[in-house]
Image (cartoon, rainbow, N blue to C red):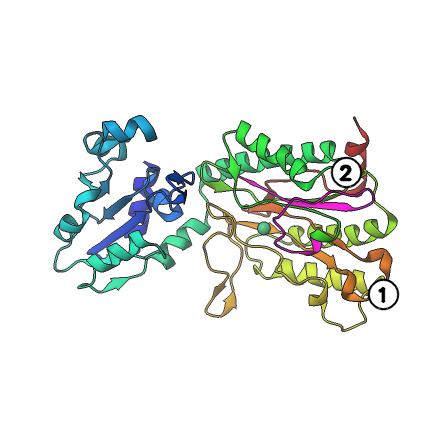
Amino acid sequence: MIHQNRQKELLSQLDDNALVIISTNPEQFRNGDVTYAFRPQSDFFYLTGFEEPEAVAVISRKHYSMFLRDKDPAREIWDGERLGLIDAPEVLKLNQALNINNLEDQLSQLISTDSTIYFDAKPCEFDAKITGLLADYSIKSLQEPLHKMRLIKDESEIKTMQKAADISIIAHQQAMQYVAPGMLECDLQSVFDAHFVKNNAEHAYTPIVAGGKNACILHYIKNNQPLNDGDLVLIDAGCEFNNYASDVSRVFPINGRFSDAQKSIYQIVLDAQLAAIECIKPGVSVHEPHKIASSIIQQGLELLGLLKAGEPLSKFYMHGTGHWLGMDVHDVGKYQHKQQHRNFEKGMVITVEPGIYIRKDDKINSIYADIGIRIEDDILVTESGNTVLTGNLIKTINDIEALMSKN
Ligand SMILES: [Mn+2]
């Protein structure tokens, strides 16, 4: 029912004769005849719950049709079972199931002269073909109403996101207990790979496992360097469970003990993160966490003498403090409305992830050189405040050192 209700809610915001066309792509080849693991388009899955590749849903107030792959016994021996045209109407609650191979001939038959067509082409061949079939019609975008809906998570989505967060929490804890000097970053990454797979989850994004100075490369994904005694390691890794993401970063000392210099930078980021999380509740501007985090980091770095008063913070903190989280790790939904930052509402999920990155060439006191810290949690906005979905993952200096000293 959940998908039918979402369709209804979407249609209630569109023109009376709206015809929504929404697609999910075919499998993508990695090399030769090997495909990447298939993952449905988020918008398509959100509205249909259908997880097979190569399908187009056509939804109006009067009917719900879907073009999908038919049964193919020979292919199913290789690739697994397909729902097929006969069972699809009952399973997906369709009025009509149509063969995807007939899309070209039959799509126009579902369009009336007075239909208002809503379709957003993703940059892929499959959608380009659909755009071609709709060349004679004027097309409206679904993004605004649909992404407004996806921004507010319902009960079932929150449950799934909590599950994704819980899986990621355990993996981060295991990594803290597993790390040792001399290990390769990819060895430490394997903790996440194994724990995610064991739990029927996968990486929601390419994980960052960055020892020492690599943590100052914001999108470091090589993950193949040794982890050195005395350095920190930054891990930004979160799983996707049932198409919903978690996004978590922690930093900890490879040998289990923070140095004094590492402690002082870490504590600034943690103070900034805690204060930023604290402010999140309905009615507060979505820009507020960044404002709060930035001002705490600015003050902290000035106190350490790393920044002069009034010097721009972007030298050491060059990214935002968070982003929407949902089916996509950088989830859909607007941050502004009429050029004003919008306010938090119940059901939104946002990350809070301040950081400090001190590169050696910053010509600073060398005890702080090559320290990169980011602490990231996933925050659900509730009726009166917020819940930290990843709140069970330790992050104080004492808690991290205590966990790492246990064998
Ligand atoms: Mn993030």
**What residue appears at the point 34 percent right and 54 percent down from the top-left corner?**
124
Given residues 379 and 327, the one toward you in this image is 327
> Which mark, residue 305?
1
**What residue appears at the point 48 percent right and 46 percent down from the top-left corner?**
326
Q: Main secondary structure of the magenta part?
A: loop
Q: 10 Å neighbourhood of mark 2: few (<14), some, or many (≥20)?
A: few
> Which mark, residue 182?
2
Three-letter residue code for mark 1: Gly
> Which mark, residue 296?
none
**What residue appears at the point 77 percent right and 65 percent down from the top-left corner?**
361
In the image as oriented, which residue stretches furthest toward the front?
32
Is residue 80 visible to us here? no
Given residues 341 and 311, the one toward you in this image is 311
| Residue 235 falls left or right of residue 70 | right
Identify the secondary structure beneath mark 2. Answer: loop
Q: Is residue 260 magenta-colored? A: no
Identify the secondary structure beneath mark 1. Answer: loop
Given residues 126 and 294, the one toward you in this image is 126
| Residue 352 falls left or right of residue 74 | right
Three-letter residue code for mark 2: Gly
Relative height, residue 170 to residue 254 (above, below): above
Q: Which of the 4 image quadrants contains residue 315?
A: bottom right
Alpha carbon distance from label 1 to label 2: 33 Å
In the image, the segment drawn in magenta is 215-239
